[in-house]
């Protein structure tokens, strides 16, 4: 008979997310996870399999929260311009609200681990593909509505916007000047019009 978990998995994932977000994958030890989650090593191994196992669940947990935020912002968008601006506004709010200057866990993971582990690389590629597809859909609608220019096709603009968002997140780790970051966003968005 399988063992029953006697802990709140969501709480454990929140605590583990904080540790990985602060220290990165390589900088986080099993002892760090034990200390943060109040679980013993055997509970972590039994429930998540390995450090990589808990990290993959943390990435999915973090991604789910980000997707919910994007979903709320996009639900309020009236047109393609509103949708793109909502994405950048949410990104800006994340940066400004990041008092510890940790950055985005997924962007950090991409720079730390994408070339070190196939499982992590696959997760990040799927996340990237979803984001680019969403941006491509928004750009395509904006071009059909004649809001955005057609100098580039929707996929090219989506790649550009995705790259800009990633760059904005990295810049925001060191520069939290809201005016600077808003000016970057304005410059990025000018390309679409």
Image (spheres, rainbow, N blue to C red):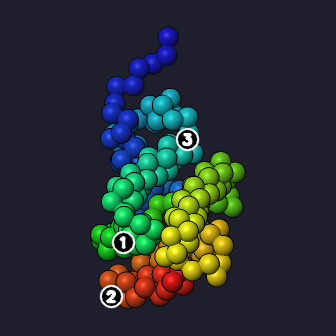
Residue drawn at point x = 53 percent, y = 80 percent: 192
User: Looking at the image, is mark 2 or mark 1 earlier in the sequence?
Assistant: 1
User: Looking at the image, is mark 2 or mark 3 earlier in the sequence?
Assistant: 3
Q: Are marks 2 and 3 in contact (CB under 8 Å)?
A: no
Eye-nearest disc, 2 or 1: 1
Label 2 neighbourhood size at 10 Å, few (<14), some (14-19), many (20+)? few
Check the image and report above or below for 18 versus 154.
Answer: above
**Between residues 63 and 75, which one lies in front from this camera angle?**
75
Q: Secondary structure at mark 2?
A: helix
Residue under numbered circle 3? 53
Residue under numbered circle 2? 179
Q: Secondary structure at mark 3?
A: helix
Q: Find residue 81 and report its horizontal and vertical position in percent.
A: 43, 72
Label 3 neighbourhood size at 10 Å, few (<14), some (14-19), many (20+)? some
Q: Are marks 2 and 1 in contact (CB under 8 Å)?
A: no
Which residue occupies the extreme top position in the image? 1
Residue under numbered circle 1? 89
Q: Find residue 71 and report its horizontal and vertical position in percent.
A: 40, 54
Eye-nearest disc, 2 or 3: 2
Residue drawn at point x = 46 percent, y = 35 percent: 44
Q: Secondary structure at mark 1?
A: helix
């Amino acid at each position: 008979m399988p063992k029953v978990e006697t802990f709140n998995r969501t709480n454990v994932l929140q605590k583990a997310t904080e540790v990985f977000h602060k220290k990165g994958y390589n900088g986080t030890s099993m002892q760090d996870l034990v200390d943060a989650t109040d679980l013993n090593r055997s509970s972590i191994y039994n429930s998540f399999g390995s450090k990589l196992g808990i990290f993959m669940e943390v990435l999915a947990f973090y991604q789910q929260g980000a997707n919910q935020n994007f979903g709320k912002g996009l639900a309020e968008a009236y047109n393609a311009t509103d949708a793109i601006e909502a994405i950048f506004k949410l990104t800006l709010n994340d940066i400004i609200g990041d008092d510890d200057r940790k950055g985005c866990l997924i962007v950090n993971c991409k720079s730390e681990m994408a070339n070190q582990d196939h499982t992590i690389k696959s997760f990040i590629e799927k996340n990237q593909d979803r984001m680019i597809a969403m941006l491509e859909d928004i750009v395509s609608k904006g071009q059909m509505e004649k809001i955005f220019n057609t100098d580039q096709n929707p996929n090219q603009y989506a790649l550009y916007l995705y790259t800009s968002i990633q760059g904005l997140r990295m810049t925001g780790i060191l520069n939290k000047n809201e005016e600077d970051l808003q000016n970057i966003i304005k410059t990025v968005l000018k390309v679409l019009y």
